[in-house]
């Protein structure tokens, strides 16, 4: 049994890989829960959350490639990877969050307007 844990820890060598795995597992669990509860809004939220996680993961992979590797692997690679530049990732995250907030506020406004028009 200990070898199973060692293998899992070896495969999930970097913090970013662990974050990606836990985010996907949590998103899957929430999506299954929303499907079982038959709650459409919760399911749509889970899809949005999953897409945001995958997008952020891709942005980090592009602009911070060193975060994909375990520190022991980085010593073997030397200077083959470009340096991390976290500012584009932070900027993309802020822009996407702002767009999502505007989208949710617009959706709330549309739902209120539709509720007023119903007799």
Image: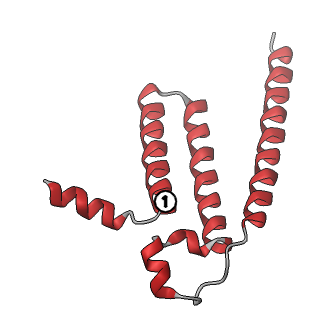
Between 114 and 83, which is closer to the camera in this rendering? 83
Which residue is depicted at the point 65% across and 73% down? 62
The x, y position of residue 116, in whole percent, is 85, 15
SS under mark 1: helix
Which residue is depicted at the point 16% across and 61% down? 3
Between 43 and 9, which is closer to the camera in this rendering? 9
The x, y position of residue 102, in whole percent, is 84, 40
The x, y position of residue 44, in whole percent, is 60, 39
Which residue is depicted at the point 67% across and 73% down? 84
Query: Is 107 located above or below residue 85 in the figure?
Result: above
How many marks are shown on the rendered structure?
1
- Colour mode of the rendering: secondary structure
Horizontal relation, residue 62 to residue 100: left or right:
left
Quarter of the picture holding the C terminus: top right
The x, y position of residue 69, in whole percent, is 49, 73
Q: Residues within 10 Å of mark 1 (few under 14, many from 20)?
A: few
In the image, farthest residue toward the top? 119
Which residue is depicted at the point 46% across and 43% down? 26
The residue identified by callout 1 is 15
In the image, farthest residue toward the left? 1
Horizontal relation, residue 50 to residue 108: left or right:
left
Horizontal relation, residue 77 to residue 54: left or right:
left
Query: Is 16 located above or below residue 109 in the figure?
Result: below
């Amino acid at each position: 049994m200990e070898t199973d844990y060692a293998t899992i820890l070896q495969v999930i060598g970097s913090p970013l890989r662990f974050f990606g795995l836990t985010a996907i597992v949590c998103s899957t669990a929430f999506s299954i829960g929303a499907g079982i509860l038959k709650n459409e809004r919760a399911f749509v939220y889970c899809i949005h959350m999953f897409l945001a996680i995958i997008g952020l993961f891709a942005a980090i992979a592009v602009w911070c490639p060193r975060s994909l590797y375990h520190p022991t692997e980085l010593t073997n690679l030397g200077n083959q990877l470009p340096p991390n530049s976290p500012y584009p990732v932070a900027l993309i995250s802020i822009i996407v969050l702002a767009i999502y907030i505007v989208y949710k506020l617009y959706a709330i406004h549309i739902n209120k307007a539709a509720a007023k028009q119903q007799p």
